Amino acid sequence: MGLFRNDPQRVQLESTQTELRATAPPWSLWADGFGRLGIRSIQLIVVVAVAAGIIFVIQSLTLVTIPLVIALILSCAFAPVMRWMRRRGAPAALATVITLLAIVVILSLLGWLIVWAVRDQWDDLSTQAEEGFAHLLAWVRTLPFDFVQPDQIDEWVETLKDFVTSSQFGSGALAGVSAVANFVTGLVLMVTILFFFLKDGPQMWEFLLRPFHGGHYVRARRIGDKTVGVLGSYVRGTATVAFVDAVGILIGLLILQVPLAVPLSVLVFLLAFIPIVGATLAGILAALVALVANGWVNALFVVGVVVLVNQLEGNFLQPVLMGRSMKLHAFVILVALTVGTVLGGIVGAILAVPIAAAAWGVIQVWDGPDLPARWARPKSPIEA
């Protein structure tokens, strides 16, 4: 053993290893398991910081970012129309103007229907609401237990009157005027951006792809095509489903003689763009109007109509129209709605689900036309 310890070759080998460890580059310390964990932690921190910065910029520039995203989604929805007109030989500018005018006319028609119907029936509905509120107060006073004291009701009414006539209500009205001004500014900006997206969208995308080459360029093109397809299919499918829902509920409300049937059906169409939650809100609004105007029996019939239409849409129409465009679990939809609502309010709730669907579509074509990213591929029992 002593001869083995004094072996010149072994002594030289140990000396060489000691010198290598002493002269090893410092980044070799990151090669073991703990070092790789540290690298992943740093990468995760950087990703979170970048995401937080992007969210901060989006929230700070909502007057720009929201019209930009809406214009992008609308341009994806009407991309087939633009391609069809260009194949027919229509100039790009003419096709863009025709498509843009069609979009503006549709949006203006929806707004006009709501304003016209509400203005036409508002007097009758307000009178019925006052009578219904008076009947409700009279019913509360006849309860055998002291649920609400009459003095408390009078106090609440006086508090409401004081708030309406106070400076706080006036400041809220001024804030509402500012919100209307921001809405008009955003609408004009959205229409302008939409014009350029419809006219020069493919050229803009090619310009953004200039830094990519080879396989990276092919992947970027594939991601862009998939995003356009998913967003367009989502908007067109949702609009079709919403239109069918609105027509079905409109027929039911007209049969039941519920006031404001037209604006309620328009609200059903608009709220259908918020999955899961929108149908519930539309049903609640329709039932409340029927309760105030026609009584609780009519309100129950309205609830039945809303449930029937939503069941027909969810079980028959939606799987056919949107089965390929949005394959998201209900849990993912709820999380996306929550995040979108927190970050962007009602507009964020409307945009959250199509953005999530587009992100999932990108993952599905990350490694090929029909090949998802490696971590998102289903595993066989052997691989698992």
Image: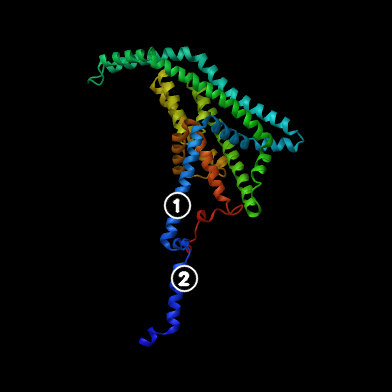
Can you give x and y, in whole percent of width and height, for residue 153 in the image? Answer: 29, 16
177 versus 359 height, above or below: above
Checking the image for residue 328, the label placed there is none
- Tell me if residue 80 comes above or below residue 215 in the rendering: above
Circle 1 residues within 10 Å: few <14, some 14–19, many ≥20: few
SS under mark 2:
helix
Residue 198 spot, x, y in % from top left: 66, 34
Which mark identifies residue 20?
2
* Residue 107 locus on image (x, y percent): 59, 26
Q: Earlier in the sequence, mark 2 or mark 1?
A: 2
Judging depth in this view, the residue of 353 and 250 nearest the camera is 353
**Quadrant location of the N terminus?**
bottom left
The residue type indicated by label 2 comes to Leu
The image quadrant of residue 167 is top left
At x 45%, y 60%, the residue is 30
Quarter of the image where one finds residue 322: top right
Where residue 262 appears, as percent x and y from the top left, is 53, 21
Of 344 and 64, the residue lying toward us: 64
Using the rendered image of the protein, determine whether residue 384 is visible from the camera's viewpoint: no
Residue under the image location 46 percent in, 31 percent down: 345
Crowding around mark 2 (Cα neighbors within 10 Å: few <14, some 14 to 19, many 20+) is few
- The residue that label 1 is drawn on is 42
Name the residue type under label 1: Ile
